[in-house]
Amino acid sequence: MRFLKWHASDKLAAYLDNQLSAPDRVRVEAHLAACDRCRKELTHIRVSDAAIHRLPLVSAPDGLWSAIEAAADSHPRPPHPVPGVRLTWQYTAAVFLAAMLASGYWILSRPSRPAWEVSALNGAPLAGERPLQGLGSLYTGESIETDSASRARIRVASIGSVVVEPGTLIRLVATGASEHRLALRSGAISAVISAPPRIFIVDTPAATAVDLGCEYQLQCDRDGAGALRVRSGWVALEWKGRESLVPGGASCRIYPGRGPGTPTFDDASPDFIAAVNAFDQSGQRGALNLILDRARTRDTLTLWHMLSRVNAADRIGVYERLVALAPPPASVSRHQVLALDADTLTRWREELAWIW
Amino acid sequence: MEWAVSLAHPEINADILESCRQGDRDAFRVVYETHKDRVYSVALYFFHGDATAAADVTQQVFLKLMTDFHHFRGDSAFSTWLYRIVFNTCVNTSRRNKSRAIKDEPRLAQTLASTDSQEADLARKQTADSVRTAISALPPVFRLAILLRYFDDLSYEEMAKILNCSVGTVSSRLSRAHRLLAAKLAPLKAWLGSKDSL
């Protein structure tokens, strides 16, 4: 076999399943004609493919539907039409007329800006400089301010809620179908969001928290120093092209003028977390050595982020420690990682995410 | 029980989906009947043949489908949305049950034996047992990719949405999963009819 730098290994399943684009298919076929190794791998995949097709589909047990119905009956759910009611034309017309009347009333009486429902949880927070007692509204451009004895809850359209902790100032920047955006000036919030990624966004003075479908706490002071702690799901912290991806069970500090620090899992050892914080603040070599020495398999979250945050010489050490803890897939080459190829780093992160 | 994995993928029509949106229990029943065996099979093979875990996952999936149907906005295929729920439920249940590592092949064998026909071909059954064992030994990320591909006939694009990764990563995971399976299934190569040596 003559020497070939590129192999089609990662594309062979797609080739067999006819899922490649025409140019990729031509490229793979040309490669297969010249490469013994990839032809042999294709044979392996055919054997495996034939074997899997012999697996039986197993019937779900009888009685499962009854259990699901019983569970659904005891579960709160959105209202739906009374069973048995059919959509006759009279019914449809009545609903249409009611909707027209309601929308006409709404158009005449609606506020000039979109509003969110807010409620006081403790004390007397201010919503748009109005004392909030019980339920109220927060309009675009308005802020909620809590003192040391008050808390409030914001209902974020229909996608979740945010609890505004004591001593917090937060403003509603925008709300719409494609984006709901708050600006946290200082203080702390706890957010629970169920929405597609990148719909709910919170700006802080030193970083922007982009929800990727999750539950998290975010706090910052007036200078911008802060921290993010994610309970479940993922949050992206972004600032001027620098990004930290923080999964459930992990935290990340925010530094004024430098944006997000390097995320660490909350169950990492205190000296590991202290070393990461020291490295983020001063780039100390001693801190880097301690990070590499103490990292567990799960701490590849931290090491993966550090790849793009250390100098070229130190990157080799970070890469080798990562490889020792979690060998990369074949499609991730040392050369591409050290060159910080974005696609390669993303592929490796997608694999590593399974152990995070 | 069917013996060969059927790649014909049933799709639920728009009228049924609209009725589900209205909370029509009969429409949900149609969705359940259409997908229950596939969802159950994916969960059963994912959880190493643990029938209790598979039934629990199947119940969770369809309960979530009924209670959260208003979140389905129709901007992706219904099957993509459904199998995203299957994927999340399998992964979350697997994380919750980490301490309860399941290596219970006899339970799977029992499950299958109880539903198998008397005319089942012994060689075919032994092959299926070997394949099941090999799939059970795959890392979860590869296991789910293989199961979704073969039980649900999803395109790589749909799988990428479900697995939250790129299409290239789907191909890479399936290729690597096949290589690992082929290595374990080498003794069956002749029976499976391959011409080249492993």
Image (cartoon, helix red, strand yellow):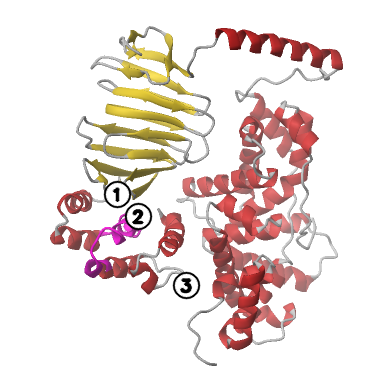
Give amino acid for label 2.
Leu
Q: In this view, does A267 lie above or below A319?
A: above
Asked if the residue at tag 2 contacts the one at tag 1, i.e. Cβ–Cβ closer than 8 Å, the answer is yes
Image location (x, y in percent) of residue A355 = 42, 56
Query: How far apart are the alpha carbons under marks 1 and 3?
Result: 27 Å
Task: Look at the image and tell me whether residue A181 can be seen.
Answer: yes
Closer to the chain start, of discs 1 and 2, is 1
Horizontal side, residue B31 vs residue A290: left or right: right
Describe the element under mark 2 as helix, strand or loop: helix
Give amino acid for label 1.
Thr
Q: Give the range drawn in magenta.
A: A295-315
Horizontal side, residue A80 vs residue A198: left or right: right
* Disc number for residue A264: 1
Image location (x, y in percent) of residue A133 = 38, 6
Task: Report the residue at 63% width, 69% height from top.
Answer: A13
Crowding near the residue tagged with mark 2, few <14, some 14–19, many ≥20 C-alpha atoms within 10 Å:
many
Image location (x, y in percent) of residue A343 = 45, 62
Describe the element under mark 1 as helix, strand or loop: strand
